[in-house]
Every structure is written in C-alpha cells, then in structure tokens.
C-alpha cells in the first residue's frame, strides 16, 4: 500500500504505508499541486494543480504515464 502527499515545492512524495519509507519523489508539476487521487485498485495516481496540467502516474514505479494536457484547460479536481 502506498500513500501520496503533495509538498510545497511542487513535488509529490510517495511512501510505502507499511514501512513509512519514501518510494518515489514525483516532480513534473510547475506550480502548486491541489489534488491527488489513487485509482481504486492503486495502480494509478492522478495529480492536478495550478499549472493547469493533469498527470497520471504509475505510483509503484514512480513513472509519469500521461500528462501535458493543453494549458488553456483547467484541472480543478481529481476524483
């Protein structure tokens, strides 16, 4: 099981919830991150913020799977 938290430096910290060890530091956002959500099965992590970009991550591997939507579109929340 993983836990994710957005930090004030525009990064996402992913921890192993059993050991509290840092698994990954995700750093593709260019401004404050306002929303994080895991998929129900835990395979994906979505993040959105003030940079107006929605990213989809593989939190197990710390890899960006999708991102870079048009900056003219706003990501307001992730559920």
Image (cartoon, helix red, strand yellow):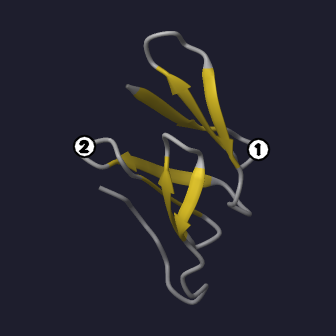
Q: Describe the element under mark 1 as helix, strand or loop.
A: loop
Residue 68, given in percent of the width and then of the height, sits at: 60, 78
- Which residue is pictured at 64% across the width and 36% down the height? 24
Q: Quadrant of residue 3?
A: top left
Instruction: Please tell me how crowded label 1 is: few (under 14), some (14-19), or many (20+) other residues with Cα within 10 Å.
Output: few
* Disc number placed over residue 9 in the picture, else none: 1
Viewer-nearest residue: 60 or 37 = 60
Image quarter (top left, top right, bottom left or bottom right) of the C terminus: bottom left
Q: Is residue 68 above or below residue 40?
A: below
Q: Is residue 76 above or below residue 3?
A: below
Viewer-nearest residue: 61 or 78 = 61
Which residue is tagged 2?
Answer: 41
Q: Are marks 1 and 2 in contact (CB under 8 Å)?
A: no
- Which residue is pictured at 50% across the width and 21% down the height? 16
Tell me the mark number nearer the camera, choosing from 1 and 2. 2
Q: Quadrant of residue 12?
A: top right
Residue 52, given in percent of the width and then of the height, sits at: 58, 73
Circle nearer the N terminus (1, 2): 1
């Amino acid at each position: 099981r993983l836990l994710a938290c957005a930090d004030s430096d525009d990064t996402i910290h992913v921890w192993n919830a059993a050991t509290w060890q840092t698994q990954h530091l995700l750093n593709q956002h260019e401004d404050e991150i306002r929303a994080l959500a895991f998929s129900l099965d835990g395979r994906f992590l979505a993040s959105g913020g003030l940079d107006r970009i929605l990213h989809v991550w593989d939190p197990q591997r710390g890899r960006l799977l999708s991102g870079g939507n048009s900056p003219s579109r706003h990501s307001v929340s992730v559920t």
